[in-house]
Image (cartoon, rainbow, N blue to C red):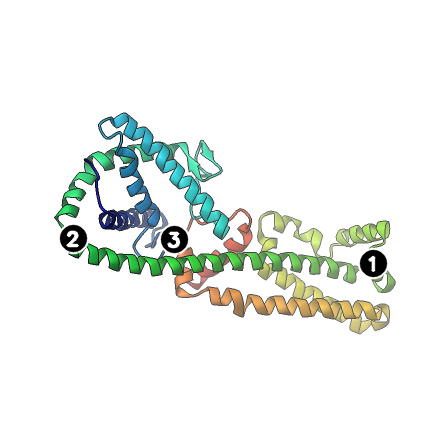
Amino acid sequence: MVFNYNIIQWLFLFFFYSFCGWCWESAYVSILEKRFVNRGFMRGPFLPLYGCGGAMMLIVSKPYYDNIFLVYIAGCIGATILEYLTGVLMETLFKVRYWTYDHKKFNYKGYICLESSLFWGVCTVVFSHFLQLPIEKLLLAIPMNILSIVTIILTVINSCDFMLAFKTAIELRDVLMYMDKAREEMRRMQRRLDVIIAFRGEDVKEVKDGIGSRMENLGNKAYELGFGLSSKVGEIGNGIGNRLDVLGSSLEKSFSTVREKIMSSPSDYVLGVREEVSELYAKYRIIKDRMTPAPVKDFFEWYKERTIMGNPTMSSEKFKFSLEEIKEKIIKKK
């Protein structure tokens, strides 16, 4: 009976396929990137998705081993389901995609595509009927006690690596979420400062208190006068205006302008407005301080940097600008 292995042998094969997958992916991506890329979710030379894929190919081909066409169909379906579930689960947990087929025709939400599914079917046939046979001979030739020791060691090493990778992915998710909240808060501050710069005294108070048409008219007038927002529309369109450093630089200039206006003509600004400016600046300083030493600065540690560098196609639909900003900072450090 084909592929009739015990638990230790299956586990060893899982690590073997994971290693082979890492060699293939790292070589392929390194050639494309023109630099060495330690590919994968973990930092060790193992890609669990390939380990699962290899085991899955053997399992689904087992009942249809004598019918190559059915083996091909089973491989297409099995690998596609595995790839889709893995992609959905990882994005749900980490808010980041480690791969995407958006650029391929006949893809489904970027998780899977027809080209990939057909290719997995071919791989299943080749793998189960040709490659696995010599691998099986080598596997069965290894004494069981040696195989058990090696497998246990690999299990411990990979478990530690996976836990660290999981923790890193969760931290990255938290950083992205914080950066997004900080970006929205900084935009809100900028809008308020634009109004304070444009108007004085009770005009500013009325805008703050939300007097219907008056607020809308004053807000629109402020934008038309060009106190920051209207000039940023083009930048926001291509992502520049969404960068935290750009928003921070704009806020610094706005705070400086407001301070100069208040100092030159304090009577034009009621006490409530001056207090509001102080509160806004205090909030801005808190955001800036948090973004510098923690969590972002602490995030750029060796393991976490290598996670980003090892997945150059990593993307996030929800946190696109934050992830791109992190990537750019890591590349600049290199």
- Left or right position of 75 against 239: left
Instruction: Tell me which amino acid carries mark 3.
Output: Phe
Count of numbered marks: 3
Name which residue lies at 64% across and 56% down. Answer: 184
Q: Is residue 2 above or below residue 313?
A: above
Q: Residues within 10 Å of mark 3 (few under 14, many from 20)?
A: many
Mark linked to residue 41:
3
Residue 160, position as x, y percentages in the image? 35, 61
Q: Which mark is residue 144?
A: 2
User: In x, y percent, where is residue 29?
Assistant: 34, 48
Instruction: Name the image quarter holding residue 300.
Output: bottom left
Gap between marks 2 and 3, in whole Å? 30 Å
* Horizontal relation, residue 42 to residue 175: left or right: left
Q: Is the C terminus in the top left, top right, bottom left or bottom right quadrant?
A: bottom left
Determine the secondary structure under disc 1: helix
Q: Identify whether 35 is placed above or below 69.
A: below
Say which amino acid is labelled 2: Met
Looking at the image, is mark 2 or mark 3 earlier in the sequence?
Answer: 3
Q: Is residue 298 above or below residue 225?
A: below
Q: Quadrant of residue 292?
A: bottom right
Residue 315 appears in the picture as rendered = no
Q: Which residue is mark 1?
A: 209
Is the residue marked by circle 1 packed among few (<14), some (14-19), or many (20+) residues within 10 Å?
Answer: few
Q: Quadrant of the N terminus?
A: top left
Foreground tag (2 vs 3): 2
Task: Say which residue appears at 75% left-offset and 71% top-offset.
Answer: 260
Q: CA distance from mark 2 to mark 1?
A: 78 Å
Identify the element where label 3 is drawn: loop
Residue 233: image location, x then y, percent: 66, 49
